[in-house]
Amino acid sequence: MKNQIEIRTATLEDIPEITSIFRDTITHINSKHYSEKQIMIWASGADAIETWEERISKLYFIVAKIENIIVGFAYLKNGNYFDGLFVHKDYQRQGIGSKLLRIIESQVMMNDFEVIKSDVSKTALPFFDNKYYDVIKKQKKTVKGVVFENYLVEKIF
């Protein structure tokens, strides 16, 4: 039987689990598409605890749990900018990302926006493509002096 995925609002107490998922997902899953240096810089974002506190306090930020373990999270910025979606490296392809995405999209529609946008990694692009997101443009972003290639995607409701 499939484990029940429970969704709830993130709390500051969740930060250790959230940052662990963030770091582990990048180092284990995204490493297929990005260099070691890119992975190191990107994963170091887990150490910015004040940034995570601010996200949880100010943004629409949800976590997915299975049997009291946080297995994923997602957050929304400015009503319709999907700023982050991460699923635990050991819980990939179990419907967690899809469930988080559906709830984020519902929130966008409840906020009366007709479009949702996101910057997604090369790794995440097939997931968003399968959920009817269109690539607006391929782009390069610089983080701590390192250039990353990603995609601006959108979905119109």
Image (tube, rainbow, N blue to C red):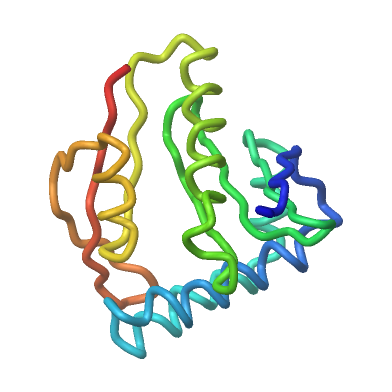
In the image, 105 versus 65, the foreground residue is 65
Relative side of 7 to 121, left or right: right
- Residue extending farthest to the front is 1
Q: Where is residue 124 shown, x and y percent of the image? A: 34, 58
At x 81%, y 47%, the residue is 11
- Residue extending farthest to the top is 112
For the C terminus, the quadrant is top left
Q: Where is residue 86 shown, x and y percent of the image? A: 53, 58
Relative side of 4 to 154, left or right: right
In the image, 145 versus 154, the foreground residue is 154
| Figure quadrant of residue 142 | bottom left
- Residue extending farthest to the left is 137
From this view, report whether residue 117 is shown above or below residue 48.
above
From this view, report whether residue 133 is shown above or below residue 95.
above
| Figure quadrant of residue 135 | top left
At x 56%, y 41%, the residue is 100
Q: Where is residue 52 shown, x and y percent of the image? A: 67, 56
| Figure quadrant of residue 130 | top left
From this view, report whether residue 129 is shown above or below residue 72.
above
At x 66%, y 67%, the residue is 19
- Residue extending farthest to the bottom is 36
Relative side of 156 to 20, left or right: left
At x 45%, y 85%, the residue is 40
